[in-house]
Amino acid sequence: MYFAALLARTEDGWEASDTDLDDVETLSDLTELAREASADDEETVLVFIEQEDSWFALVRLDGEDDPRIYVSDAAAAARSSYGEILLTDELLGRDPGSDDDLDDFTDLDGTEDGEPAAAAGPDEDGDDDAETSEEAVPPGPIGDLHILADLGMSQKELLSLAEDALAEIADALGASEVLETVR
């Protein structure tokens, strides 16, 4: 189960809105959606995305700057269509258009067109597909570890988050009440 919300910082404090990511296919789409939530082009907007008990992500937009991204567990996010949006070549340290394709990781049940999943193991070259996956998308946190530093949450605090991470982040930002209204 996924949860997604937008938090926009205004002169009066944080404003939250839940968001539907069904029509979001790229990071550009997500960025556009977040900017539309802002009444002022200079406001900070945070996008919270969470897959229950698996991973969470933050996307931060400050005015017209490029989005800043933090993903708590890249390998877990790579198995999600929403995670695929966030795990850009740049974030993963790959050359754009490289042979590593996240589409290989997004078929959660391992089937195609209802066919049973093949047993995991070495491919024709004798290589284990799991090793290739681990090389392409590292386990653990990835992205901007200082994404919330100026808003009251240090890198150490961000890395220590586990269950209910978004609530703890909202609490540190002074936005827990507005986040709860959209949960």
Image (tube, rainbow, N blue to C red):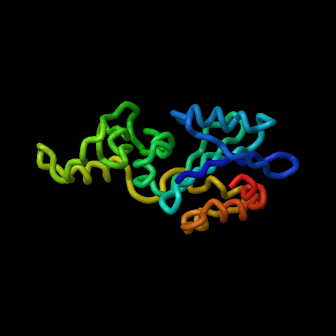
State the image quarter where residue 8 is shown: top right
Q: Which is nearer the eye, 17 or 47?
A: 17
Q: Which is nearer the eye, 38 or 114?
A: 114
| Place of residue 158 in the rendered image (x, y in percent of width and height, measured from the top left) | 59, 63
In the image, what residue occupies the spot 42% across and 55% down? 76
In the image, what residue occupies the spot 52% across and 50% down? 143
| Place of residue 55 in the rendered image (x, y in percent of width and height, measured from the top left) | 50, 57
Image quadrant holding the C terminus, namely bottom right
State the image quarter where residue 22 is shown: top right
The count of marks equals 0
Placement of 175 over or under 118, stated as above or below: below
Residue positioned most to the front: 114
Q: Is residue 146 left or right of residue 177?
A: left
Q: Is residue 63 left or right of residue 55?
A: right
Q: Which is nearer the eye, 88 or 179?
A: 179
| Place of residue 170 in the rendered image (x, y in percent of width and height, measured from the top left) | 70, 60
Q: Is residue 2 left or right of residue 128?
A: right
In the image, what residue occupies the spot 74% across and 61% down? 176
| Place of residue 97 in the rendered image (x, y in percent of width and height, measured from the top left) | 37, 31
Q: Is residue 70 left or right of residue 137?
A: right
In the image, what residue occupies the spot 23% across and 49% down? 129
